[in-house]
């Protein structure tokens, strides 16, 4: 159980998670959701229905004691004509990956609010992914996967941030911008696993090349008893920076309950229209890994 958290009533997410967890068993790899041919990603408004779209970006692979960040992540997604996921595959720079496909009998539950999508494949791997159309993103998405919520800690858990990276020539040299969006991921505490979601804010000073990051209103769902709880102790605060000649940033962060870690990400869109990345934090309270994204 998450200790010290208050009950939080979010019925649609609770019902979806109860349904997902009830049909799963832990462990295993992913089922295939990829297509023989894919279209490179530019923007979500340009993606055609029922077309596999290939993306790239950054990732974090995590255990309870360490993490590895990479800019070698990749993914492949397909949407139907209603802009709902029908297939999702994600691969971290470490090589760890997972796939989900409704055509293969995997579960993809959509319409949970803020673009949140829960997926579980037949091998019992669970993921929390952002539908960019529902989140009103144009140039990115993000997701995290591991043992399904309520299951044992996996050997590792992973998160990716994927999209159309800002070219160096598109990076502003002056001004400050506030990016607003969401964060989601996995939290493991003892033998329990949880999905988490939160609001995200990133203040960027383009002249100083700094990123001030924070999350708020964090909730956790998928505990063994099916409860949904407010989780303010998992709210995060971080600070990052980037060098001249790049649109990639990195930094450190901490949670309200004392876990510490890092964040890695980049700007997306032709002129740093959006920001996204992955995070990791660990400590005596467990560990958390996930992704985040926001737009101006």
Image (cartoon, grey):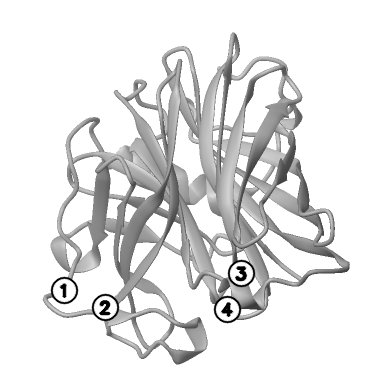
Secondary structure at numbered mark 1 = loop
Q: Residues within 10 Å of mark 1 (few under 14, many from 20)?
A: some
Q: Earlier in the sequence, mark 1 or mark 2?
A: 1
How many angstroms separate mark 4 from mark 2 (CA)? 17 Å
* Residue 41 shows up from this direction: yes
**Residue 114 quadrant:** bottom right
What residue is pinned by disc 3?
135
What residue is pinned by disc 2?
52
**Residue 281 quadrant:** top right
281 horizontally vs 6: left or right:
left
Q: Earlier in the sequence, mark 4 or mark 1?
A: 1
Q: Position of residue 285 (x, y in %)?
A: 60, 13
Quadrant in which the N terminus appears: top right
Q: Kindly indicate whether the residue at mark 3 contacts the one at mark 4 (C-beta within 8 angstroms).
A: no
What residue is pinned by disc 4?
138
Q: Residues within 10 Å of mark 2 (few under 14, many from 20)?
A: many
Q: Residues within 10 Å of mark 4 (few under 14, many from 20)?
A: many
Q: On screen, 117 above or below 22?
A: below
Q: Nearer the viewer, mark 3 or mark 2?
A: 2
Q: Residues within 10 Å of mark 3 (few under 14, many from 20)?
A: some
Q: Earlier in the sequence, mark 4 or mark 2?
A: 2
How many angstroms separate mark 4 from mark 3 (CA)? 9 Å
Q: Kindly indicate whether the residue at mark 2 contacts the one at mark 1 (C-beta within 8 angstroms).
A: yes
Q: On screen, 181 above or below 136?
A: above
244 horizontally vs 165: left or right:
right
Near-viewer residue (97 or 238): 238
Q: Nearer the viewer, mark 1 or mark 3?
A: 1
What residue is pinned by disc 1?
35
């Amino acid at each position: 159980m998450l200790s010290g958290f208050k009950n939080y009533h979010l019925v649609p997410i609770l019902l979806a998670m109860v349904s997902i967890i009830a049909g799963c068993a832990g462990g295993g790899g992913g089922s295939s959701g990829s297509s023989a041919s894919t279209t490179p990603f530019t923007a979500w408004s340009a993606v055609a229905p029922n077309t596999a779209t290939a993306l790239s970006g950054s990732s974090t692979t995590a255990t309870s004691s360490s993490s590895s960040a990479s800019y070698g992540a990749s993914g492949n997604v397909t949407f139907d004509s209603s802009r709902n996921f029908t297939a999702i595959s994600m691969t971290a720079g470490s090589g760890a990956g997972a796939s989900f496909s409704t055509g293969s009998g995997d579960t993809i539950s959509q319409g949970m609010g803020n673009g949140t999508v829960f997926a579980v494949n037949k091998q019992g791997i669970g993921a929390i992914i952002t539908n960019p159309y529902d989140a009103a993103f144009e140039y990115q998405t993000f997701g995290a996967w591991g043992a399904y919520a309520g299951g044992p800690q996996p050997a590792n858990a992973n998160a990716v941030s994927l999209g159309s990276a800002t070219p160096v020539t598109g990076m502003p040299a002056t001004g400050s911008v506030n990016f607003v969006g969401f964060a989601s991921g996995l939290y493991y505490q003892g033998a329990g696993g949880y999905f988490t979601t939160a609001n995200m804010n990133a203040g960027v000073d383009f002249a100083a090349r700094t990123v001030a990051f924070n999350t708020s209103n964090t909730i956790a769902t998928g505990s063994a008893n099916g409860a949904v709880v407010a989780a303010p102790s998992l709210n995060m605060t971080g600070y990052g920076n980037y060098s001249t000649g790049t649109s990639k940033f990195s930094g450190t962060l901490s949670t309200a309950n004392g876990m510490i870690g890092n964040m890695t990400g980049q700007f997306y869109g032709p002129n740093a229209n959006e920001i996204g990345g992955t995070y990791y934090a660990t400590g005596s309270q467990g560990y958390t890994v996930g992704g985040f994204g926001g737009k101006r």
